[in-house]
Image (cartoon, helix red, strand yellow):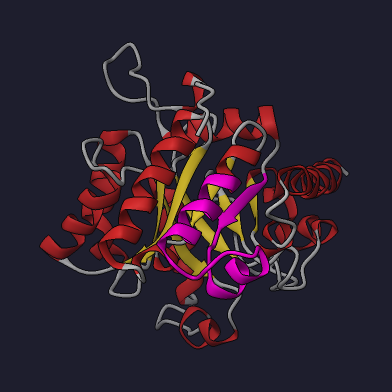
Amino acid sequence: MTAHPSPDHHPSPTPSGRPLPFGTRLRSAMDERGPLCVGIDPHASLLSSWGLNDDVAGLERFSRTVVEALADSVAVFKPQAAFFERFGSRGVAVLERTVADARAAGTLVLMDAKRGDIGSTMAAYAETFLHEDSPLFSDALTVSPYLGYGSLAPAVELARESGAGLFVLALTSNPEGAEVQRAVREDGRTIGATMLAHLAEENAGATPMGSFGAVVGATLGDLSSFDLDINGPLLAPGIGAQGAAAADLPRVFGAAVRNVVPNVSRGVLRHGPDADALRGSAARFADEIREAVAA
């Protein structure tokens, strides 16, 4: 893949010697390129629609095409680890190359792996995706807090050290999520609201934006009962194929809409394998999102 270095989007050391925080780099990328996040989701039906075999060669061709077509124009790529892992070690090798090539080309990489565990196991997950020496090192990682928010401590600590970020599942778009995330604690606060409050604490005082974000579905409608002002990014899946539109963002996210990172996967990817069609679709979504956020 052709690389287009963009050092502003990578964890270059600050004067103190620490890596530039993810929140700072994400804000810069969003301001420069717009906030669109494009998923890299090579599931079998999509490979087939591209005329590719459901094998490692098809996986690599798909991923290479997406990165080459869009790496110089979108702020964030979000590869879904499961679609690579299903091919075993050779699939993971493709994921490693995809991450490295996307980051070398100047695009931030959010690894969608939704890891969550306790103690040394959570630490190992963190090292896999958040340690700078790992071949899967990503700018950010999705994590699940439903063994208790405190179980994420190893990932939070390593993310701070490496200049990476986390996106914590808070108010997800799947209907089943409500039975956990909308459950009410003894203090009267929902579990989802509790996760948002934890993230606000992690991001306190960060400028221009904290590195610890929440996953909040764009399909959820009115969320005015939740405090989404966490001083951090809000990953918003659901635009496009899941039914939400860019115009819905201000209504769903209110005053926090400037920190929203809308994720589109099938809405863009279905236009492949033609690179121009992929670029055109991503550009249309990006324009619609900019217009909605600026309204």
> Is residue 278 something one can see in this rendering?
yes
Residue 280 lies left or right of residue 160; in this view the side is: right
The outermost residue toward the top is 15
Nearest the camera: 169 or 109? 109
Task: Give the percent coordinates (x, y) of residue 107.
Answer: 53, 35
State the count of labels.
0
Verify whether residue 49 appears in magenta: yes
Residue at the (54%, 43%) spot, across then down: 231
Q: Is residue 146 above or below residue 265?
A: below
Residue 36 lies left or right of residue 85; in this view the side is: right
Task: Give the percent coordinates (x, y) of residue 111.
Answer: 42, 53
Q: Is residue 259 above or below residue 215?
A: above
* Highlighted range, magenta: 36-65
Nearest the camera: 132 or 81? 81
Residue at the (77%, 44%) spot, across then down: 286
Locate residue 50: give its quadrant.
bottom right
Q: Is residue 23 above or below residue 56?
A: above
Task: Give the percent coordinates (x, y) of residue 126.
Answer: 24, 53
Residue at the (58%, 56%) spot, across then down: 39
Residue at the (34%, 66%) spot, across then down: 85
Verify whether residue 168 appears in magenta: no
Locate residue 138: give its quadrant.
top left
Nearest the camera: 6 or 49? 49
Q: Is residue 241 above or below residue 207?
A: below
- Which quarter shows the C terminus? top right
